[in-house]
Image (cartoon, rainbow, N blue to C red):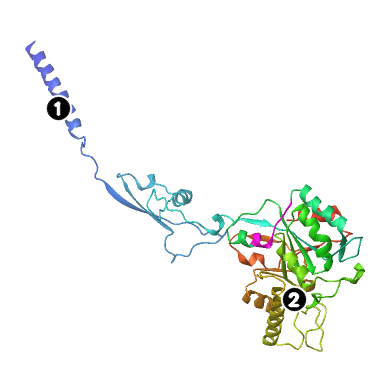
Amino acid sequence: MRFLKFLLLICLLGIAFTGCAEVGSVNTELPPETTEIVTVKFAADEPKQTVPAAVEPIATVRMATEAVPSTALTVTEAEVTEAKATEVTFTEPIGSTTAVLTESTKPEPESVMVPILMFHDVKTYAGGTWSISAENFRDKMEFLSENGYTPVTFAQLVEYVDGAAPLPEKPVCITFDDGYYSNYKNVLPIITELNIPITVFVIGSMIRADGIEPDPNEDALSTMNAAEIARMEASSLVQIQPHTYDLHIRGYGNSEKRGDVLPLQSESESAYKQMFAADCALAENALTDAGVAEYTVFSYPGGAYHRWAEAVLRERGYRITLTTNSGHRNLVVVGDPESLFLLGRMNVNDETTDKELLGYLCKK
């Protein structure tokens, strides 16, 4: 019995020794952290093209890893491309409220389209291309009112551009060229009744001499004299302005005839400017004698103009010049004095229909 107990004790001790040896072989220390450099080479974008061996690696990725087999880490081209695409670079502190106003974000300046109507002779009966009957003229003025248009002066246009005063929603300017006696006899009573402002452009050399009565034949196209011009100018509804002194119908001190302000073929710039400035002075003096005090608007005879003439007029203080180009968009802009030069006009006569007139008025 004692022998059996001894054998049993020996077996138990053997089992215990074997288990301790196995436990002691377990490594309980954590593997040290290592840094591994992974170099990735990608093929070129072009198909069937390889990257030469001398080319530096396209991307090198540095990362901290645990000690794992090298085959456990795989980096693809798609992953690197995605990582680059999600990079964000801040060029100024986050939260900055600084705003940069570019040309595309600047507000458009205030502006308005201003149609300008051009009349000439106004007879007591229907006329031709350059005339209209008094009755038809009245109808056209009432047509403007019925369609919401408000006649304005050129002084109002200047104030608008200078930012001094607004314009009505649908402004329109009414003008008369040449200075015919019919403007005084037939037009003044109508505009006084309807309260419509107009501008009359007078040819200085054509002012009718004192003591000469207007021809009773309306087709003779008599012009106003100084007294009649003065009465027109005295009205708060009428502004008298130059239409040249002698550059419209007759020649100006030269064997070569002028029918407008265009330079003669043989004329130099300096000679032309001297001639045109002298004509402007004569026109202004003739109108000053008739009571006109200020010169800001000039109407080109026949609508023909030249840059040399524009330069002279600006030097003399004119703010507005008019042509006869009905296709021109008269966009008048606040803060832009240039928008008042070379404005176009539509000629209106007895043959002008309401549809044609409205088409011009509504043109944008």
Q: Quadrant of residue 11?
A: top left
Residue under label 2, please give it: 244
Q: Nearer the viewer, residue 30 or 326?
A: 326
User: Is 239 rendered above or below residue 31?
Assistant: below
Is residue 190 on the magenta stretch? no
Mark 1, residue position: 17
Cβ–Cβ under 8 Å for marks 1 and 2: no
**Residue located at (81% from left, 83% from top):** 251
Q: Residue at x 63, y 62 (%)?
A: 158
In what quadrant of the picture does the N terminus appear?
top left
**Where are the magenta residues, as a range?**
149-157
Residue 341, quarter of picture? bottom right
Kindly state the secondary structure of the residue where label 1 is placed.
helix
Q: What percent of the width, then of the height, locates residue 100?
A: 47, 56
Q: How far across and down, in percent of the image, does residue 281 sit?
A: 68, 79
- Determine crowd level at label 1: few under 14, some 14-19, many 20+ residues with C-alpha closer than 10 A: few
Which amino acid type is shown beneath numbered disc 1? Phe
Q: Residues within 10 Å of mark 2 (few under 14, many from 20)?
A: many
Residue type of the residue flagged with mark 2: Thr
